[in-house]
Amino acid sequence: IYKWHYSGLNRWHGAGSTADFQKIIQERCDTYTQTIRPGSRSRNCQAIRQAFMSAFISKDPCKATNEDYNSLINLAPPTVPCGQQVFWSKTKELAHEYAKRRRLMTLEDTLLGYLADGLRWCGEPGSSDLNVWSCPDWRKDCRTNYLSVFWEVLSERFAESACNTVRVVLNGSLENAFDSMSIFGRVEAPNLRPQVELEAWLGNDTGKTPSDSCSGSSIRKLKSILDGRNVKFRCMDNLSRDQFLQRS
Ligand code: AVW
């Protein structure tokens, strides 16, 4: 039993793959291409599902590379119209509500972001199935797991395609509203193109006093990353959730 536990499907410290992963991907893809963005040029959902599966099935779940996702991302690059992008960090719900009201787009409003939102997946060498028992945890097992690498490459492509003015929703109720180790901090901000303008909005959790502001050290750090890339920067702080959703 001891040996099985550590060599078998249960050995990773993260939760296993989402049940019915393939079916959910296929259904979400049909919904997105037929109902949510029927105007977007028609995409082959079967090919997308197959490319998604072949990115990680039968592979060592700790040896994901950016290249593993190339063919999938090339089938549906996460690009959005100029000036419509919304990035987020520790503000997933607020940022999505904001984007919806303003008709702007987060990564989860692009096809691949929509397909994978909230799902988990990993495979196992020598098997053509997903491992539903456990998947590698970013901290305890490996950083190069298929889930983390997916969000990193997709986010990188999303950020590279930004143009004109784009926005990021940050959490002003945290000590460091800007986290240089987050995907936004590590992958998106450093990949914005010169001449893009980034507007940062620091929203506060309802009932919580602001802990960070535009003049704090974490935002100064963000500004220095952007200065190095010739990205213009503006910052708005001290907004409650409601003020934020109304005024922004
Ligand atoms: P975080 P980050 N579904 O709140 O800046 C499931 O610190 O790191 O924000 N997991 C996800 C999803 C999703 N839709 N998106 C990211 N993750 C993972 C992409 C990922 O491992 C967007 F464009 C991430 O580190 C945002 O601007 C963590 O959950 C930016 O990345 C959320 O951590 C948010 O990533």
Image: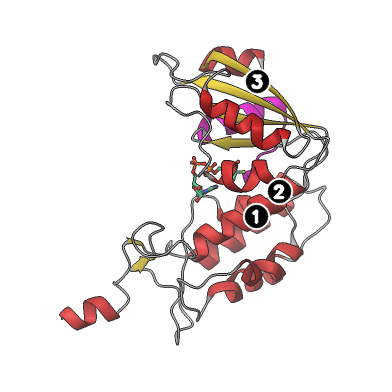
Q: Which residue is mark 1?
A: 154
Disc 2 CB within 8 Å of nearest ligand 1 atom = yes
> What amino acid is labelled 2 in the image?
Phe
Q: Which residue is mark 2?
A: 158
215 on left or right of 105: left
Q: Position of residue 224 (x, y in %)?
A: 65, 32
* Distance from Cα at disc 1 to Cα at disc 2: 6 Å
Question: Quadrant location of the N terminus?
Answer: bottom left
Q: Secondary structure at mark 1?
A: helix
Q: Is residue 84 above or below residue 31?
A: above
Q: Residue at left 60%, top 59%? A: 27
Magenta stretch bounds: 92-109
State the residue in front, 14 or 133: 14
Q: Secondary structure at mark 3?
A: strand
Q: Which residue is mark 3?
A: 235
Disc 1 CB within 8 Å of nearest ligand 1 atom = yes
Q: Residue at left 16%, top 79%? A: 2
Q: Position of residue 196 (x, y in %)?
A: 80, 35
Q: Is residue 180 above or below residue 79?
A: above
> What amino acid is labelled 3 in the image?
Cys
